[in-house]
Structure formats: structure tokens, C-alpha cells
Amino acid sequence: MSEQIPYKIYLSENEMPTAWYNLRADMKNKPAPLLNPGTGKPMTFDDLRPVFCDELVRQELDNDTPYIEIPAEIRDFYRMYRPSPLVRAYCLEKKLGTPAKIYYKFEGNNTSGSHKLNSAIAQAYYAKQQGLQGVTTETGAGQWGTALSMACAYLGLDCKVYMVKCSYEQKPFRREVMRTYGASVTPSPSNTTNVGRKILEKDPNTTGSLGCAISEAVEVATTTPGYRYVLGSVLNQVLLHQSVIGLEAKAALDKYGVKPDIIIGCAGGGSNLGGLIAPFMGQKLRGEEDYRIIAVEPASCPSFTRGRFAYDFCDTGMVCPLAKMYTLGSGFIPSANHAGGLRYHGMSSTLSQLYHDGLMEARAVEQTSVFEAAEYFARVEGILPAPESSHAIRAAIDEALKCKETGEEKTILFGLTGTGYFDLYAYESYNNGTMTDTIPTDEQLQKSFATLPNIG
Ligand SMILES: *Cc1c(COP(=O)(O)O)cnc(C)c1O
């Protein structure tokens, strides 16, 4: 049977999903609602309207509709770079000498280099539909900002990006890709916003964080007519859009009658993992099938494995709604880990609830072991992986090696979220042997937990 499975399983264009799948519809314990920081009450449609465009607010609050149609214009855009390939990692299996069967869904086949374009085009589309002039956002490593710039350029929307300062300085190339697509890029914290000035006053040498940049982008969106804020991860709506990854992966596996035993993804804010697992978790929630699902996070920013399940601010400036999630505290600023996309203090409320209910596992891995896996994978499978994606590679290799010990022929599916061409300083530090692992101490985490708001 396995001989018949090609190296790459492609769907044809007319096999692509026409609706996103909303995992929340099948959850018995729904993710906790966003709370208004002023009143402590759940955020309503009207509370959220000044921040997000209307249709996205509807999607954010919709815990019941299982399938939401993908508008035709978004499906046309998807056709430029989707369906993405599902690869059978024959070369990796052989090199490892494992009886495991390994598949990965590769989302790096577009200029932005990651899965983030799947949600960027959706969010930009709804903003355009509403007749808005532009959107604001933050970006950490730059993947989200790049994806959003591409989507905005395609639709003719203005795009203002607040980029975490250390990335702005360390990753000039991503900045220039964004500017090429017409976005304006400001290093954060900046003195263009009240919240940025406040943060700089307290700590003039801060290298910034996603939490700071979010505060700035939200402030600009809510104070500039014709603008709304968009976010590349964490939110329910982003997981919804990213379900296209899992729907395609499942359709491709179904073609060959393959059922994964283990599904693995890296977790920053949870969007790629939430998208990859969506249809599989749906089956699990409905009691139709069982899967082992593993979230992999950096040991330097271990929201799932060492965080608290509590209401917290989504941003450092505490202007955003409160979300119930696994969090390290909104004031937590992780060490300058190279996987910029995994440096967020919190985690999607949907995944947090699933993890809390024992429906998935999580593990934290150290940076140097992640780059070992990245290098191994690049040499065997050819693709130069993003550091974020390499967290999933690490776990997939570890699971495949366990199968080698036990002789079990498990089928492993993992998400290869992007390419690492813009992360070569990280590879340089690994190649030079100067990369280190920085893990927060319990004392550091306790200090950060102490600032959690006292709610539910
Ligand atoms: C942003 C990013 C991630 C992490 O974000 P999630 O929302 O957790 O998916 C992972 N991989 C790549 C390549 C990214 O750009």
C-alpha cells in the first residue's frame, strides 16, 4: 500500500475546501468568552466593532456554525498558492530508519513563506467588503506583517505594521518585503502612540514584544477613522481561516485511506496547530475517531507547559479584551529566542480549552535541539524550515525514533508551517556554535503570574 503513495499528494483545485470548519461548533466546553476589561462582562458584537470589522466579529463570536463558506474571491486568491502539498517524508523515514510513516503539510510555498497568508487574505477581504481604508497590525518575526502586506496590496487596502523592535533591527529583509508590498512599518514600541510612549518611558531600552506592538496597533486602529485592527493568530477567527490547512490535509490522506495516529504542530498563538487539527479534532470531539495531538512550544516561552489557565490581557498595554488562556502573564517578555513567531505570552482560547480538557498534549523543546532537527531535516528533505516549524520537526523526529525502538508503525502528520530564508542569522548562530538555550526560572514566572488580573 505505502508504495502507492506518492511523495507529494496534491488535491486538484476543485477538491479544495469551499467552507472553513469551525471547531468550536463541536466543542462541549466552549472556549471562554473574551471579557471587556472595563466591565468584566463578555465582549459583545458592539464592544468589538470599533476594533475588528463586522464580519470578523461575527466569526469571532460564533461558537455554533460548523461550516462557514469561503467567499469566492478568497478562494481565487487561495488558488494562487494552494492547495499546499502534503508530503510523504520517505527520505526522512529512511534516514531515521524508522518504521513510522511521516507526512507533513507544507505551508511555505508562497512569498510570505508561511501559513499566515491563509488568514491575512480573509481578514483583508472582509475589511475591504466593509469599505474600510486600511488595517493596522503588529508583527513579531515579520511573517504575519509580510502576509498581510501581500493581501492588502492585492485588494488595494492601506496596511500599517508595528514591528517588534528587535525584529525590525535583526530582520531588515522582511521589513523591505513588507514595504515592497506597500505597507508602512514602524518599530515598536514607538513614540507614535500613547501606549508606546508610556512603555518607552518605563523601559527606554526595551527590545519590544508582541504584546507591546499589539497595544500600539489597536490604539491606532481605534483612533483613526476607516481603520480596523487585524491579528495573525490567537483569535477564534484566525483558527477558523487556518482550518483550510487541516481540511486539505485530511482530504489528501483520505484519498489514500491513511489515518494519522499522531498529529503534531508548533504552537505560538495556536493558529496553525488549531487549523491543522481542526477536522481531526472534530472527529475526536464527536467520538468518531481518536488521535494523539501534540502542541510543541519553545522552552523559552512555555505557555502550555508552564503557564496558568486564567483570564489575562492579550497585550502589554492592557488595552485589549481579556482572554481565558494558558498564559505566562502579559508582562512576560521572553528571552531573544530565534523562533520569533512563538514568542507570545498566551495561547488561543480554543486550544487552551481543549488542552485543559485533556484532548491534546503539549511539550516544550529547547532551541538548540530544534535547530539540530532543522539541519537534519534540511539535509534530508531539502526544505530549509522556519525555526518555528522546526519545533514540530523536532517532536516528529522524536516520535519516529520512539517507533524505531518499539517497532510500531505509527503514522505521524506534522505541520511544516514555513521556510527559514529570513532566519539565517539564527542558522548562523547555530552553525557558529554560539546558540544558547534560555529557560525562564520559576521565580521569573511567579513574578509574571503575580500581575495576572484577578478574574474567574
Ligand atoms: C507565526 C508562525 C508560527 C506560529 O504561529 P501560530 O499562530 O501558533 O501558528 C509558526 N510557524 C511559522 C512559520 C510562523 O510564521
Image (spheres, rainbow, N blue to C red):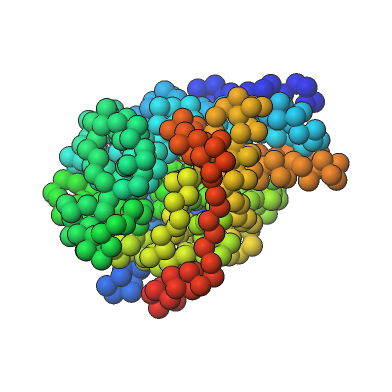
Outermost right residue: 407
80 over 307 or under it: above or below: above
Quadrant holding the C terminus: bottom left
Horizontal side, residue 26 vs residue 409: left or right: left
273 over 76 or under it: above or below: below
Quadrant holding the N terminus: top right
Which is more toward the observer, 379 or 263?
A: 379
* Image location (x, y in percent) of residue 372: 63, 39
Q: How many marks?
A: 0
* Image location (x, y in percent) of residue 337: 48, 49
Q: Quadrant of residue 44?
A: bottom left
Q: Is residue 49 visible?
A: no
Q: Quadrant of residue 254?
A: top right
* Image location (x, y in percent) of residue 258: 72, 34
Q: Quadrant of residue 182?
A: top left
Q: Is residue 221 visible?
A: yes
| Residue name at image x 22 percent, y 52 percent | 190
| Residue name at image x 60 percent, y 55 percent | 364
Outermost left residue: 225
| Residue name at image x 47 percent, y 64 percent | 327
151 over 213 or under it: above or below: above
Horizontal side, residue 115 vs residue 172: left or right: right
| Residue name at image x 44 percent, y 51 percent | 336
* Image location (x, y in percent) of residue 345: 44, 59
Horizontal side, residue 259 vs residue 313: left or right: right
Which is more toward the observer, 41 or 324?
A: 324
